[in-house]
Image: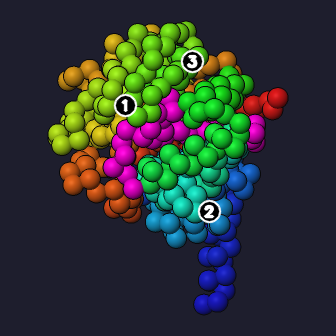
Amino acid sequence: MRTLITILCILHLGFCQAASLLIPMDKLQKNHLKAYGIAFLALEQDMVVDWLLNYRGGSFLMEFSTGIESECVVRGVTYEIVSSAQSNTILRNISGPSANMHLVRMGRAPKIAVYSPRNELIEDDSDAVLLVLDYAEIPYEIIYDPEILDDQLVMFDWLHLHHEDFTGQVDKFNWRESARLENEMQIINAQRLGYASVPEMKRDVVQKIKIFLAGGGYLFAMCSGAETFDLALSAEELEINPFDYEILDPELNFKNTLAFENFILEQGYSRRYSDINVGGGFEEDLGYFNIFEFSAKTDIVPSILTQNHEQMIPEFFGRTTAFNKYTVKPTALILGENGENGNVRYIYGELGNGHWSYYSGHDPERRSYRGRNTSPTDLSLFPNSPGYRLILNNVLFPSTRKKRQKT
């Protein structure tokens, strides 16, 4: 009996040594969000991971590893062990000229930074990217204005911006408990760093981020972080009365912006920063937006950013709920929009050697703010969220590109 068990173990070991581990990303996957964490873990261990675009929802294929298999079991991620012959068949089908699929080799785990005021006093636990990075078990570092102004962005590959106001106005959405602390911290930072005002400090922060992007960085911005970043880029001098939100006639230069042009700034107390932001109020019911399908073999980047097991994504609110299509620059590629009302939800572009994506809305699984419940979303209730998958596509995107030069 022991001899038989030994022989079976040897056969299994030999099979595994010649096999690959496939993480399917179609509707059979039990936990899509943690699957990205498995791919990231494999990259951290210097394993080669292949991203199979449009194959079973954008699956991951890697050399078999008992350690990775164990992590899949622990994290509840669906996986399959495939033989060399099966792998070759999959890759042959993907490479077929008539198949809208493509293999992208992932070579390294990117260094991730999240721009956030979170510290020992400010929890900032509503940032969707922080939530999904924690849930997927993908490591990151928190940075804010002092670190960016100290040129620490050079240490990172990927930067996320969320519910921020880069124009430097007093927080218009001050129903959040941490809003007062955030405003006080920004004033203290500005004074400590030698700035006369918060808007003046934010202008320099925005320029530092733009340099990072042009030099080959990856920028992913959501909600008002996307909108106000472009607002700040459009105005070299933005004078603001913080008590009544009066913006004093800036001359806007749309050549400086990444995504938007011909927009109008909102004056006075308002729930909007500009007419870039469209969409219903927080009490309305939203519909769905669709992500577009691209040619995986020729439009590789947009194909990476739209990998999903669903094409229709439930809409969700935010400080910037949706983008006004009439303000989107023709140089920006629309990745997703609401076909009924034409509101844009997801766009992509390039600057210099870098790439950026803007994703509107605050939390892909918080479709209503009735009662203004600000408790963080429990992603264990949404392990297959297609809206959150778009975020994680962006997180892994730098792993598919060549290492950028540090300058």
Q: Amino acid at mark 2?
A: Ile
Q: Which residues are magenta?
A: 149-177
394 is higher (above) or lower (below) than 96:
below
The spot of residue 340 in percent (x, y) is: 20, 24
Tag in front: 3 or 1: 1
Under circle 1, the secondary element is loop
- Residue 244 - label: 1
Of the pair 61 and 223, the residue shown nearer to us: 223
- Give the label, 3 or 2, closer to the camera: 3
Please identify the residue farthest to the right as the structure is shown: 407
Q: Quadrant of residue 321?
A: top left
Left or right of 181, for residue 326: left
- From what the image shows, is residue 202 above or below residue 341? below
The residue wearing badge 2 is 68
Q: Mark 3 = which residue?
A: 237
Residue 48 visible in rendering = yes
Q: Amino acid at mark 3?
A: Glu
CB contact under 8 Å: marks 3 and 2: no
Q: Which of 327/117 is in front? A: 117
Q: Does the magenta segment cover residue 37?
A: no
Q: Position of residue 382 (x, y in %)?
A: 35, 56
What secondary structure is the stretch in magenta mostly built from? loop
Which residue sits at x=62%, y=55%? 139
Q: How many C-alpha atoms fall within 10 Å of the one at disc 1: few (<14), some, or many (≥20)? A: few
**Label 3 vs label 1: CA separation?**
18 Å
- In percent of the image, x 57 and y 49: which residue is there? 185
Q: Which comes sooner in the sequence, label 2 or label 1?
A: 2
Residue under the image location 64 percent in, 67 percent down: 66
Mark in front: 2 vs 1: 1
